[in-house]
Amino acid sequence: MTRLLVDCTFVFNHPELNTGIQRVVRNIVNNFSSVQDEVVCVPIIFKQGKILEVKQLTPKYADGWPGRAHRKLEEVANKVAHKLIQIRHRYWHLNSRLMRLWPWNTYRLVRRATNLVFHVCSLSFVLPRILVEWLLNKIEDQSRAVEMECDAGDILVLLDSSWHTDFFPLVEKLQQQGLPVVSVIYDLIPMTHPQFCDNSLVQVFDRWFEWIANTANGFVAISSTISDQVRDEVQRRLGSDKADRRWFDFFHLGSELDLLESNKSVRPAVQKLFTSGRSVYLMVSTIEPRKNHAYLLDAFEQLWANGSDVVLCFIGRIGWKNEQLIERVRSHPELKRRLFMFNDLSDVELEYGYSHAKALVFPSFVEGFGLPLVEAMQRGLPVLASDIPVFHEVGGEYIGYFDLARPESLGNMVRQFEESGVFPAARHMVDWSWLNWESATRQLVQRILHHVETQKRAQSNADEPERCPQ
């Protein structure tokens, strides 16, 4: 029987993370049971040159000493990581300030020496986290994943983020044994918009895409917009003949939050914000350059200057290349008055925010999909978003679109909404609907099976010797 072997290595090793790709992987894996009538889906990880079947994607702690120790260490790890991230951003913000001063702005050698010292010292932010993760792995429940063997009819699906991994030789070996390889692509941002990414990621991602373009039999993107980009890039790298031997498709993501734990509560500060009686506009995302938080600050500062009492709230962990923005937020005169930032909300608190906010505002320069859009709209929360193609694919006429070149464009839409009560979109939210994660999982599985079977039939026909006429 055909099996889909679905990679979830990164999520398995980092269960504490809850950003976009991790949420997709968890939700897809959690809904495998809904498609077992069509195909057997097996979550797997790659470890030390072997494939392991995942029995338990996220750890469940036992009542004994190992479980308590693991839980306590993970709590410490998360606290340490959050604090080190805060320190790291202040640290590199200091570096960026120094580089504008004499002698750093004049002498290249001084700049290079200082940057070398900064990079060496930055290891002190990384090593404690690595140590805690090593300890967690040492006492981890080994039954979470067990070694398995592949069968001839299996299909390997690289669902998780894989550009930082070392399992490429194993994947190539499995493909040589006859297993089709399918790559799920979330976006090509490190290649199309490298200015928003760390240089190291740009280089690693480019090498990974070169490998996956030459290796994968097919590609499934998370939107039609990204699928078209993937096809164009594969053709550019391999040429039309080789690209035509691969298949390209997409599926759409679901909308439920999967970490709504019943024992979690909404902290008083969050409740107070959303029950203040004021209009709260949410931005839900990792805080990084391409998400364009600075645009929101510009737009809402204009609103506040004109007397508006609307509230802007950032929800999301602190990412990269944002030292100036974080400093701007933390020193802002409206912080904890009309400007709020939460970097560690649980899904319960995020659900509360979606349910009590006035609208979601999403000014991204570029996205692969925009998961918060469908999460918000599925809960009846209207969305104002940047005018980019993928948002039109996801939200259509139910979203209000603003001009990224003009912060006053968003400001005018917010003011109109506040004064009239009429949301500035072409169609009303009541007519909008979206698929859930079960439907998204089924869509992904069905499209993979269709293309793999089609490719097998085509290959079989090509290999069949032509019969001579009698």
Image: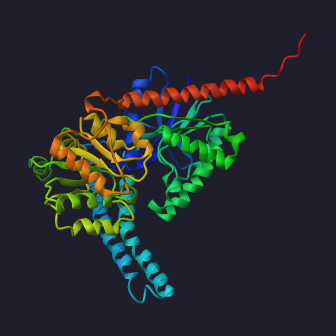
In the image, is residue 104 above or below residue 403?
A: below
Query: Which image quadrant: the C terminus?
Result: top right
In the image, is residue 273 above or below residue 32?
A: below
Q: Quadrant of residue 392?
A: top left
Furthest toward the top, the residue is 470
Task: Tell me if residue 431 can be seen.
Answer: yes
Image point (46%, 28%), residue name: 443
Viewer-side residue, 166 vs 266: 266
Relative to 278, 242 lies left or right: right
In the image, is residue 275 above or below residue 79?
A: above
Image point (33%, 38%), residue name: 374
Query: Which image quadrant: the N terminus?
Result: top right
Instruction: Give residue 220's position: percent from left, percent from top.
Output: 52, 37
Q: How is the image coloured?
A: rainbow
Instruction: Give residue 60's position: percent from left, percent from top.
Output: 30, 42
Image point (52%, 54%), residue name: 192
Viewer-side residue, 172 vs 196: 196
Task: Tell me if residue 265 can be seen.
Answer: no
Instruction: Give residue 31's position: percent from left, percent from top.
Output: 38, 30
Furthest toward the right, the residue is 470
Viewer-side residue, 468 vs 301: 301
Q: Quadrant of residue 141?
A: top left
Image point (59%, 28%), residue name: 451
Q: Quadrant of residue 12?
A: top left
